[in-house]
Image (cartoon, rainbow, N blue to C red):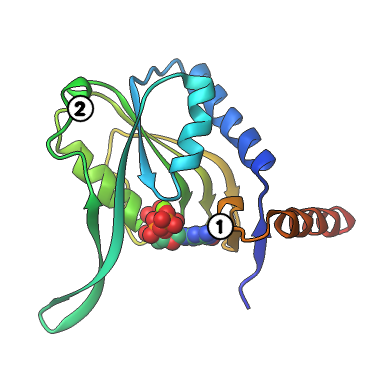
């Protein structure tokens, strides 16, 4: 069974702050964020407290495609910056998502954005799962991950039906971890 981990909004906030600090310490300046929905929306909004730059958004989904008789999962754009908004032309953008898992969605989005008339592109994810990735990030991109995590299923607070139960699970898991 896949192991699970729970993060609270407070955990996420602290991770976001760490990412912002690292970006600032690296001396990188971004003009805007591009959040990859839905998981990137809340992290991008939290990051705005620290970076104070506008948020743009894209959304993707997986779909089954057939080529040469083989069915494969491919990423599809649900909503995109098409055409690229004028204020973003030549500007440095920070792409924000919650998790770097298989890297399929992230690499797809970054390749698409690299083909646009943008300045420097960076990417910030809350969590990077330490696992073999299905795709590679294009060259020349700055990469920030808040926490490197094991390949466990992450329960994010925005997916919780009962936020109190979610927070209790996070607390219990933390106590168990501390006892080990
Ligand atoms: P990646 O490029 O960022 O690695 O994403 P990948 O295509 O591998 O991920 C497929 C979907 O699975 C993504 O959702 C991603 O957020 C979600 N996912 C992967 N690992 C976890 C996890 O541990 N916990 C949770 N809650 N989600 C995970 P998506 O299709 O972009 O949907 P959305 O939920 O962001 O709208
Ligand atoms: Mg996502």
Number of residues whose C-alpha sits closer than 10 Å to that of mark 2, classed few (under 14), some (14–19) or many (20 or more): some
In this view, 28 is above or below 166: above
In this view, which residue lies farthest toward the front? 162
Badge 1: few (under 14), some or many (20 or more) residues near its Cα, within 10 Å?
Answer: few
The reply to whether discs 2 and 1 touch (Cβ–Cβ < 8 Å) is no
- The yes-or-no answer for disc 1 within 8 Å of ligand 1 is yes
Q: Quadrant of residue 30?
A: top left
Q: Position of residue 159 (x, y in %)?
A: 56, 57
Q: Nearer the viewer, mark 2 or mark 1?
A: 1
Determine the residue positioned at 56% across, 51% down: 158
Q: Residue furthest bottom?
A: 69
Residue hosting label 1: 159
Residue 118 is labelled as: 2
Horizontal and vertical percent position of residue 27: 45, 15
User: For ligand 1, which image quadrant applies?
Assistant: bottom left
Q: Secondary structure at mark 1?
A: helix
**Residue placed farthest to the right in the image?**
179
- Taking the spot 68% from the left edge, 54% from the top edge, the residue there is 163
């Amino acid at each position: 069974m896949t192991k699970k981990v729970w993060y609270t909004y407070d955990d996420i906030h602290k991770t976001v702050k760490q990412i912002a600090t690292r970006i600032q310490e690296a001396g990188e300046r971004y003009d805007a964020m591009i959040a990859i929905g839905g998981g990137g929306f809340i992290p991008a909004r939290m990051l705005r407290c620290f970076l104070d730059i506008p948020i743009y958004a894209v959304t993707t989904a997986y779909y089954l495609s057939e080529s040469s008789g083989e069915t494969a999962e491919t990423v599809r754009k649900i909503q995109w910056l098409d055409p690229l908004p004028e204020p973003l032309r030549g500007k440095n953008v920070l792409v924000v998502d919650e998790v770097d898992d298989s890297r399929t969605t992230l690499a797809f989005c970054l390749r698409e954005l690299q083909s646009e008339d943008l300045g420097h592109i960076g990417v910030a994810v809350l969590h990077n799962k330490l696992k073999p990735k299905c795709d590679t990030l294009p060259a020349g991109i700055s990469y920030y991950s808040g926490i490197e995590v094991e390949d466990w299923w992450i329960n994010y607070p925005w997916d919780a039906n009962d936020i109190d139960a979610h927070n209790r699970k996070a607390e219990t898991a933390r106590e168990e971890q501390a006892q080990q």
